[in-house]
Image (cartoon, helix red, strand yellow):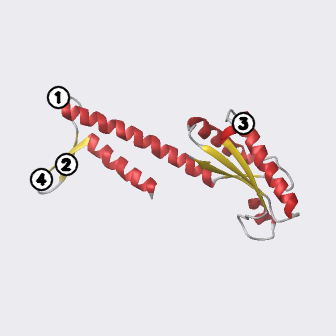
Amino acid sequence: MKKLAIIAMLFSTAAFAQTTTSTDTTQIVTTPVNPQITDAVTQAQHDELAARVVELESKIEEITRRDQINTTRAFFDFDSYAANADSEWIINEVASFMKDYPEYKLTIEGHADERGTREYNLYLGEMRASSLKDKLVAKGVNSERIVTVSYGKERAAVLGSNEAAWSQNRRGAFVLIK
């Protein structure tokens, strides 16, 4: 909802900053603002709105990247705490985001599938979260900005006792905190 409000504000601000509208009885005609603005107040308003558009575009990019990270997971093979090769892109995205936005902190949640004891799965979840943290630190993210937690098999993403469910539950989840 917040994202939609920002987008709506961006479009309305961009439209105001870039066009003027004149009407007649049959149609609406949109014409560009004169780039040779001579009125100092009008130019100042235009510059302020243009700066606001840039600021809003930047905020939308931040929100989009944050939401992608918060909803994407790194996955692991059975009985392993090395992330799949397919998960390398999300690790790179998280590292990039953390470098671009130093005001964020990160919690990495380690999860396991339902097989094995509760204790073993808590251990495996912690090892998975720690291995993801180590990869991020190796990519230049300050370790003090990262916290790890293990949920073992307690918070299954997918219910079921088959490989399709288990493969989705062997994961590392990223939670960004501002």
Q: Residues within 10 Å of mark 4 (few under 14, many from 20)?
A: few
Residue located at (22% from left, 37% from top): 33
Q: Residues within 10 Å of mark 2 (few under 14, many from 20)?
A: few
Residue located at (42% from left, 55% from top): 4
**Gap between marks 2 and 1, in whole Å?**
23 Å
Residue located at (41% from left, 43% from top): 56
- Residue contact at pointers 3 and 1, CB within 8 angstroms: no
Q: Secondary structure at mark 2?
A: strand
Task: Give coordinates of residue 124: x percent, y percent.
Answer: 83, 54
Please tell me which residue lies in front, 123 or 56: 123
Residue underneath mark 4: 24
Residue underneath mark 2: 29
Along the polypeptide, which appears first: circle 3 or circle 1?
1
Q: Amino acid at mark 4?
A: Asp
- Residue contact at pointers 4 and 2, CB within 8 angstroms: yes
Q: Secondary structure at mark 1?
A: loop
Q: Nearer the viewer, mark 3 or mark 4?
A: 3
